[in-house]
Amino acid sequence: MQITLQELQVFTAVVDTASITSAAERLNQTVSGVSRALGRLEHKLQTTLLRRTTRRLELTEEGQAFLKHARDILTSVEEAEEQMASRLKCPSGLLRIDAATPFILHVITPLIESFRARYPQVELELNSNEGITDLIEKRTDVAFRVGSLRDSTLHARLIGTSRIRILASPEYLEQHGTPVNMEQLAQHTLLGFTKPELLNQWPLHVRSGDMLQIKPVISSSSGETLRHLALSGAGIVCLSDFMTQRDRQAGRLVQLFPEQTLEITQSINAVYYRNTALSSRITSFINHIIEELGERPFDEL
């Protein structure tokens, strides 16, 4: 027995108007359609809900008992619809966000206060992961990915691009000298990633036409760890503007090979599963990030 909302609406409308014809007018349906829906409902319940006379319709005892349930169900559905509409206007509930530690620290964290001021009913859970995590397994609503996307099951929304540069601290250069060509890099301590190997390609042309593939002396899975190593004078690093721009502006890191550096940028996307019903919490957060960053490009962060 699968009673439909349409059948409940027909039943209550007939009771309220005391007429199948009037109920059909209220519901913008045909008289025959209303009559059939009422008949289906009685057949499913295996009982008579209304006595039909030549003058009027009267509720049976069973009909009177069922009417209360029907009204309660319809009221609950209306309240749920109103609540969902309200949530669209004013997002609320828990939003789980996943991103690499540097992106959480340098991009997401500075924008949390303004987002919370705008959407105070949204609760935020920020998770940092250096690798690519399974959004469903980790119960993640939206993730931010730096670089190319490989998972075709994800829906992606581009929020910006960020250039990569070769950097070192003034203290390191003072102690070890400033390399003036790629060959001299072999004499220096190079900081790089454990994986993926693609991140150890630096934006300098080699004779084959490819980018320079470096072999790090010190490696880490975390870009933020590499940044701190570079700031402490441990070596030369290649990192993205979104996490190093303030360091360059303050003189804590210096760009090497500015004239020879290729303009290589990484795309930054907000991603979520295609089969996910896009809640107002997700859209409000992504839109907020895009609006804020639209006024401050990554190379100006």
Image (cartoon, rainbow, N blue to C red):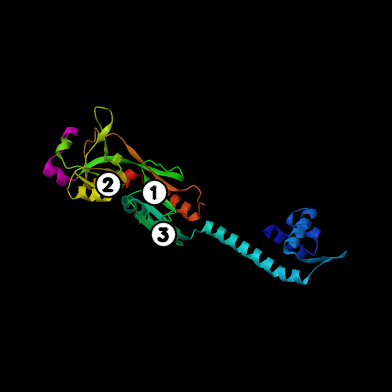
Left or right, residue 250 beside residue 65: left
Mark number for residue 144?
1
User: From where the camera sits, is residue 176 visible?
Assistant: yes
User: From where the camera sits, is residue 292 visible?
Assistant: no
Name the residue: 71% across, 59% down: 7
29 above or below 67?
A: above
Q: How many marks?
A: 3
Badge 2 or badge 1: first in the primary sequence: 1
Q: Mark 2 points at which residue?
A: 244
Where is residue 58 shown, x and y percent of the image? 81, 68
Mark number for residue 79?
none
Name the residue: 77% across, 62% down: 14
Where is residue 95 shown, x and y percent of the image? 44, 57
- Measure how far apart labels 2 and 1 are at the Cα level: 18 Å
Q: What stretch is highlighted in magenta?
A: 169-183
Name the residue: 75% across, 61% down: 43
Badge 2 or badge 3: first in the primary sequence: 3
**SS at badge 2:** helix
Q: In which quarter of the image is residue 238?
A: top left
Q: Mark 3 points at which residue?
A: 124
* Residue 173 is inside the magenta segment: yes
